[in-house]
Image (cartoon, rainbow, N blue to C red):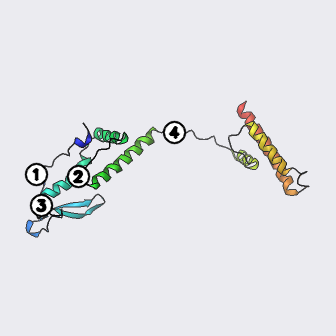
């Protein structure tokens, strides 16, 4: 059974009781309707305290739209979403309000299903402060290979070597740090792979 064939459960005639007497009513708010608007209905789900006034026929019509999803079981909603995902979107000739509700529902369910199906990605290994500092000093990212480490060390050595920088104190200090960082990262990767 496809969803668009599903009719919302009809309310019994007796459930409709006029909210105000006919002589106090203004006209039904449906354009072109000349009946008295003796039945009130909330304007929308977001405006539950704002009412529109309808005649019996049109309040029924209005409530049918409201009841559409309320009347669906979970299997039917599932089928509904499956249809939508595979591209068989029901072609409804109803008010855009209904369509809007449908898309909202579809998005929410799809997000829920997609979220549940997504496997948890493994957390990256925690890096201690010394390791992070060494990586920053050598300007290299974790994880690194021994080869990458050596290449990057050579680059940094060329940059900070005392011979190149003519005894500049800052470069000397940087050179020491680069060497210490290299030794630490080298030890780390050897321990990790042994
Ligand atoms: Zn009417």
How far is the residue under mark 3 from the one under mark 1? Answer: 12 Å
Q: Earlier in the sequence, mark 1 or mark 2?
A: 1
Vertical relation: 121 (above or below) 139: above
Question: Disc 1 marks which residue?
Answer: 13
Relative image position of residue 83 (x, y in whole percent): 33, 40
In this rendered view, identify the residue nearer to me: 189 or 90: 90
Q: Name which quarter of the figure residue 90 lies in.
A: top left
In this rendered view, identify the residue nearer to me: 64 or 47: 64
Neighbour class for label 1 at 10 Å: few (<14), some, many (≥20)? few
Question: Disc 3 marks which residue?
Answer: 18
Assign ligand 1 to one image quadrant: bottom left
- Classify mark 1: helix, strand or loop: helix
How far is the residue under mark 4 from the one under mark 3? Answer: 55 Å
Left or right, 144 with reference to 82: right
- Classify mark 4: helix, strand or loop: loop
Vertical relation: 148 (above or below) 23: above
Q: Earlier in the sequence, mark 4 or mark 3?
A: 3
Q: Which is more foreground, mark 1 or mark 2?
A: 2
- Classify mark 2: helix, strand or loop: helix
How far is the residue under mark 1 from the one under mark 2? Answer: 17 Å
In this rendered view, identify the residue nearer to me: 75 or 102: 102
Residues under numbered marks 1 and 4 in contact, where contact means CB atoms less than 8 Å apart:
no
Vertical relation: 124 (above or below) 64: above
Question: Disc 4 marks which residue?
Answer: 120
């Amino acid at each position: 059974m496809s969803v668009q064939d599903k009719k919302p459960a009809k309310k019994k005639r007796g459930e409709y009781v006029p909210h105000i007497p006919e002589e106090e009513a203004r006209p039904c708010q449906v354009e072109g309707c000349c009946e008295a608007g003796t039945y009130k209905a909330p304007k929308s789900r977001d405006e539950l305290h704002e009412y529109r006034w309808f005649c019996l026929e049109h309040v029924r019509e209005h409530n049918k739209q409201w009841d559409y999803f309320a009347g669906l079981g979970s299997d039917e909603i599932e089928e509904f979403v499956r249809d939508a995902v595979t591209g068989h979107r029901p072609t409804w000739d109803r008010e855009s309000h209904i369509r809007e509700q449908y898309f909202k529902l579809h998005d929410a369910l799809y997000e829920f299903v997609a979220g549940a199906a997504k496997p948890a990605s493994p957390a990256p290994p925690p890096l201690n402060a010394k390791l992070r500092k060494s990586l920053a000093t050598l300007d290299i990212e974790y994880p690194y290979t021994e080869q990458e480490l050596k290449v990057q060390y050579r680059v940094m050595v060329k940059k900070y070597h005392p011979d190149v920088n003519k005894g500049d104190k800052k470069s000397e200090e940087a050179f020491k740090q680069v060497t210490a960082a290299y030794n630490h990262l080298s030890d780390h990767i050897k321990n990790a792979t042994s």
